[in-house]
């Protein structure tokens, strides 16, 4: 690469000089935050963006900036309905895309929920595991035939994967106590393991997958959290950082937060990022030291055997074999 990017790089930095005319991209979660910015910058560089959202009215309003960018560049935006908490909706969305027959160059699985009270999806799965992992698992596998050689899948994970490994014996908290951030951690670990196994399964035909952590950004994702809780958590992390001689946490802007998704999906050498977990526009280091709270990926999240076991469990849970 001729230029290095980092934590403060924006989507515009990452795609500077890149022409995406003729490229077709699917982005989930385009009704707010990172999804809108991701769609905007791709459309601004000429891509034909298919934006998926649960609430199409909300997405229509939120993506005005995307349509404006597309109009200036020759790109386009099409919205499709997708409720990741309903496999009926997921399958309907996937089936419609496959029926359309138009291939994708990039899929960015951006949508998700974080730390809600205990609940279940329409299919009876714990909300975070069902929405963040199983919904995308079914969607991407069902449209895999549309992913042509050279295409990439970007799975949005999080540093929150360090809260918890997946629990293959009790994914729906039927026998263990529900802790919101533990559940979030499980789902984000699952997002990474999905990328690991999807990449293994499809690399021989030139389709690769990567997981990314966007960074700490103030978006609607935190809508279930008390602001006082968030500040207390940040204060605690900063105290640990100070003790370790590290700088305090800085929130990223939304364009900075979406940059790693775009970098991993478009500009990073595929040989560098495929099957890996990335943060701040670079491949994360393996860090299993619990005192390292700011960066890195835990070994359980990129364990190939763990990824295959999760895949098998996921197939059983959704009743489909891919």
Image (cartoon, rainbow, N blue to C red):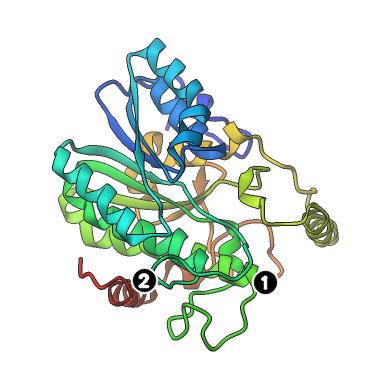
Residue 147 appears in view:
no
Q: Position of residue 150 (x, y in %)?
A: 22, 41
| Sequence-first tag of 2 and 1 | 1
Q: What residue sits right under mark 1 in the picture?
A: 290
Q: Position of residue 245 (x, y in %)?
A: 82, 56
> What is the quadrant of residue 226 in the picture?
bottom right
Task: Count the labels in the image.
Answer: 2
* Callout 2 touching callout 1 (CB < 8 Å): no
Q: What residue sits right under mark 2 in the picture?
A: 307
> What is the quadrant of residue 135 in the picture?
bottom left
How crowded pointer 1 is (Cα within 10 Å; few <14, some 14-19, many 20+) is rated as: few
> What is the quadrant of residue 6 in the picture?
top right
- On the rendered structure, is 70 left or right of 113? left
Q: Position of residue 225 (x, y in %)?
A: 71, 57
How crowded pointer 2 is (Cα within 10 Å; few <14, some 14-19, many 20+) is rated as: many
- Residue at point 67%, 39% (across, down): 252
Label 1 element class: loop
């Amino acid at each position: 690469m001729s230029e290095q990017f980092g934590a403060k790089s924006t989507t515009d930095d990452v795609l500077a000089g890149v022409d995406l005319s003729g490229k077709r991209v699917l982005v989930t979660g385009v009704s707010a935050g990172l999804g809108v910015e991701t769609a905007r910058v791709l459309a601004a560089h000429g891509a034909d963006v298919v934006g998926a959202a649960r609430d199409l009215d909300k997405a229509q309003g939120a993506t005005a900036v995307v349509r404006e960018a597309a109009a200036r560049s020759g790109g386009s935006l099409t919205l499709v309905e997708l409720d990741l908490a309903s496999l009926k909706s997921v399958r309907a969305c996937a089936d419609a895309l496959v029926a359309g027959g138009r291939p994708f160059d990039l899929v960015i699985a951006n949508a998700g929920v974080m730390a809600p009270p205990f609940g279940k999806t329409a299919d009876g799965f714990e909300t975070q595991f069902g929405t963040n992992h199983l919904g995308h698992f079914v969607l991407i596998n069902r449209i895999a035939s549309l992913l042509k050689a050279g295409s990439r899948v970007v799975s949005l994970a999080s540093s929150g994967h360090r809260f918890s490994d997946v629990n293959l014996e009790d994914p729906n908290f039927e026998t263990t106590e529900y802790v919101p951030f533990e559940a979030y951690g499980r789902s984000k670990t699952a997002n990474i393991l999905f990328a690991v196994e999807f990449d293994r399964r499809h690399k021989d035909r030139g389709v690769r997958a990567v997981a990314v952590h966007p960074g700490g950004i103030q978006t609607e994702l935190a809508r279930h959290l008390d602001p006082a809780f968030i500040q207390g958590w940040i204060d605690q992390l900063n105290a640990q950082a100070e003790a370790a001689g590290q700088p305090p946490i800085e929130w990223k802007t939304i364009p900075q937060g979406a940059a790693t998704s775009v970098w991993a999906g478009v500009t990073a050498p595929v040989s560098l990022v495929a099957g890996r977990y990335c943060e701040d526009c670079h491949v994360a280091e393996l860090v299993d030291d619990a005192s390292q709270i700011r960066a890195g990926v835990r070994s359980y999240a990129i364990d190939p055997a763990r990824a295959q076991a999760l895949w098998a469990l996921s197939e059983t849970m959704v009743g489909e074999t891919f």
